Amino acid sequence: MPKRGYHHGNLRQALVDAALVLIEEKGPTGFTLSEAAKSAGVTPAAVYRHFSGREELIAECALQGHAIFADLMEYAFNDGAPSALAAFEATGRAYLAFARKHPGHYMAMFESGISNNLTPELAAASARSRGVLERAAVELSKHIPDEKRPPAAMFSAHIWAMSHGVVELFARGAPGAKAPFPPEDLLETGIGIYLRGLGLIPPDR
């Protein structure tokens, strides 16, 4: 790719886009700033006008990912209304859809080791996306007696961990290639077992 110079287009976003491709291909720690600069068609020195280092570049990828992720989760939650159960299950499917469609963002968000507290903006974006699942958990579990109701943050963390596990084990590359069942089915049945254990859905569902 020919060098286009520092003033071409939106360099900051071009670097983010280049990093997302590299993250998908090589992992969050498998590329250098020089490689990102080369992919964006600029000199390595130009990168430092926008990012202090690779960590800050990955953090920007994560920040943009959380914004996309939260929008998708909110849409899934609202689209599942008026049933709290349908809304909750929709957020699980949205999680898998996001990981499949935006693997670079997903890895920057959850597999890079970048702290969500690195910047206030990243912390806020992460809290927003996490809050959708917590809100779904609150709506679904509000009929459980107080003494038996798990905290919404714990409830949603269980589902988040299950979703992440399905992504890591079975939704990379060709979906379901390493599993006897599609990732969506694995997650839906896993959530079903969890919800039956809480008494939120009947045993025969």
Image (cartoon, helix red, strand yellow):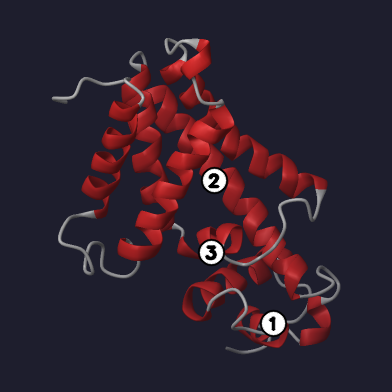
Where on the picture, by quarter, is residue 45? Answer: bottom right
Please name the residue shown 46% across and 58% down the image: 102
Q: Position of residue 179 (x, y in %)?
A: 21, 63
Q: Residue at x 52, y 12 (%)?
A: 146
Residue at (43%, 40%) from the top-left corner? 159
Of the 4 image quadrants, the one containing the C terminus is top left
Q: Nearer the viewer, mark 2 or mark 3?
A: 3
Left or right side of 61 for 45: right
The residue mark sitting in front, 1 or 3, is 3
Q: Which residue is mark 3?
A: 107
Q: Out of 65 and 199, give the one closest to the viewer.
A: 199
Q: Badge 1: how crowded within 10 Å, few (<14), some, or many (20+)?
A: many
Q: Amino acid at mark 1?
A: Ala
Q: Position of residue 60 (x, y in %)?
A: 70, 59
| Tag 1 residue | 37
Q: Which residue is mark 2?
A: 68
**Looking at numbered disc 2 in the image, what kind of residue is underneath it?**
Ile
Residue 98 in view of the camera: no
Q: CA distance from mark 2 to mark 3?
A: 14 Å
